[in-house]
Image (cartoon, grey):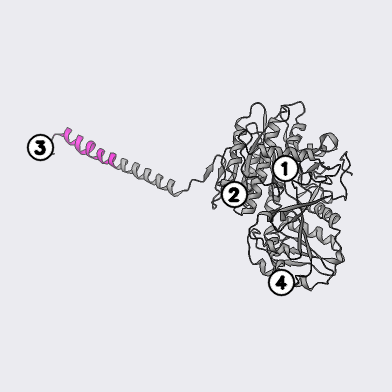
Amino acid sequence: MAGRGFGTWLREGVWEIPLRRYVALLLTLVVLGTLGFAVRTLAHDDRSCAAGVVRPEGSDECVGVSATDYDWGRATLRPVVRAIDRENRSLKGPYVTVALLEPFTATDADNLGDVLHELQGAYLAQYQANHRSNGTVPAIRLVLANPGATGAHWEHTVEQLAGMTGEKDRLRAVAGVGLSTADNKRAVTALTAHGIAVIGTSITADNLANGQHGKDPFPGLARVAPTNTDEARALTSFARVAADKAVLVYDQKADDRDNGDPYSLTLQRSFEKLLRGSPYAPWSFNPPDDRSLEGSTANDFEQITHLVCDTDAGTDTILFAGRHTQLRQFINALGERGCQKRRFTLLTGDEASYLTGDRDLDRDALNRNLTVRYTALAHPDAWLKSPPATGGSTAEARALQDLVREGQGDKVGPIGDVDLEDGQLIIAYDAMRLTYQGIRFAKGSKDLPTLEEVRNEWRLIKGTQQRVNGASGWICLDNHGNPYDKAVPIVELTPRGTARFVRIAWPEGKPPAKECLPPS
């Protein structure tokens, strides 16, 4: 310490020099920590897509519930999504929320077209309910719920919906559902277990309906589409299928535990009942797990066409239980069959409606002694050409067509390009009308109905004053929420790729009486 005083040494040796080092070290740690946080933030993807919509871990798909103008990255949905958002933001006074559950991120063009048309129908019904029902309350807020393109993320979306039943969102029902798939069945099971009413648009599988074997596994489920069994009964009443002149082609994995298909399975079982006593055992095909894909099923169908040609000369009817991609492959194969001189009629369910826009369909096959007819969910001409006296009305069909035209303008729409031939817009419009009618009937003297009041309302939607006079026909629900003797348009696929209306058929063989009261 020579030459320096003790105070200088204490200041420089103990405080200033170490302190500077400590401060520098602290600053270095702060900088490193900040950089580390930034690196971790950048390395960890932002999983949000929009308000209420996220990408689950391990997936790049945006799922969840949207109450904004988010279009799910699908430009074709953008106009109608914006129209819905505009309508929602204009609401005043008491309202309830209804969710439309559909695969909004569908990648298959046919499925995305289905989603677009159902979304358009749901919106037009929302607009009608809010603007053309003489001020009836509550108003309807429509939100969009996406379980994923294949429905794989149903659990995430269902839990989100279950959290929206409180005072903030006032969710009272979920409509849509669309395809009769195993994941959609799980979603409906979970939603109804939460006490939420569900209204199916185009689900037709018998095992996605109440009342089968006297049981109601989905309390609060209502539907506007007939079951596959009812569609098959209506088809039989129209076509008079003879068991000794028909064969069945079906999806062999339809009852698979993990990759089954409720639609194909229940259609198969309905057709099997019609073919008791047939001289031929059914023939199966093996589709990919994702039935929207091509797979190698075309190979199966090439071989099956040889079997078709080997049948007795009196065999003229083929019943097909499968999805639309496989149906298209089978039609194309039949167009190349060896026995071109023999005429066959192929009968199937409403999945055939997808084929009107399928560019891979060999339309020339329909000029080669082959007729394809199917049970449609709805058709724009059904109530405009010689409609029956009961079971529906021309006025309701025309009212929807007028509303569709308005939807091309700025006041109601624009809602994008519209195609009524596949019936999806019509059936979704009717499903939403059923939903809103049930909510408003359940309101009673209170401003807003409870979840329980809504799901208990379906047993009373019948009779002359309380049925839904739908654009697809009357909707008179039985005590299990299924439409009684619902009109089933029989439609023929034309070589031009259009759906030609043939005739209305009925599960009971005739339309319901004007009272529309289902029997016990």
Q: Is residue 296 left or right of residue 279?
A: left
| x then y, percent, for residue 358 | 65, 57
* Span colored in magenta: 1-24
Neighbor class of circle 1 (other Cα within 10 Å; few <14, some 14-19, many 20+) is: many
3D distance between C-alphas at marks 2 and 3: 82 Å
Query: In this orientation, does residue 197 appear?
Result: no
Is the C-beta separation of discs 1 and 2 under 8 Å? Answer: no
Label for residue 198? 1
In this view, the residue in front, 71 or 98, is: 71
- Which tag is nearer the camera, tag 4 or tag 3? 4
The answer to whether residue 23 is magenta is yes
- Which tag is nearer the camera, tag 1 or tag 2? 2
Q: Reading the chain from its start, which is encountered first: label 1 or label 2?
A: 2
Is the C-beta separation of discs 3 and 1 under 8 Å? Answer: no
3D distance between C-alphas at marks 3 and 1: 92 Å
Q: Reading the chain from its start, which is encountered first: label 4 or label 1?
A: 1
Is the C-beta separation of discs 4 and 1 under 8 Å? Answer: no
Q: Amino acid at mark 4?
A: Gln
Residue that carries the numbered disc 4 in the rendered image: 303
| x then y, percent, for residue 508 | 87, 50
Q: Is residue 285 left or right of residue 76?
A: right
Label for residue 105? 2
On the image, which quarter does residue 349 sit in? bottom right
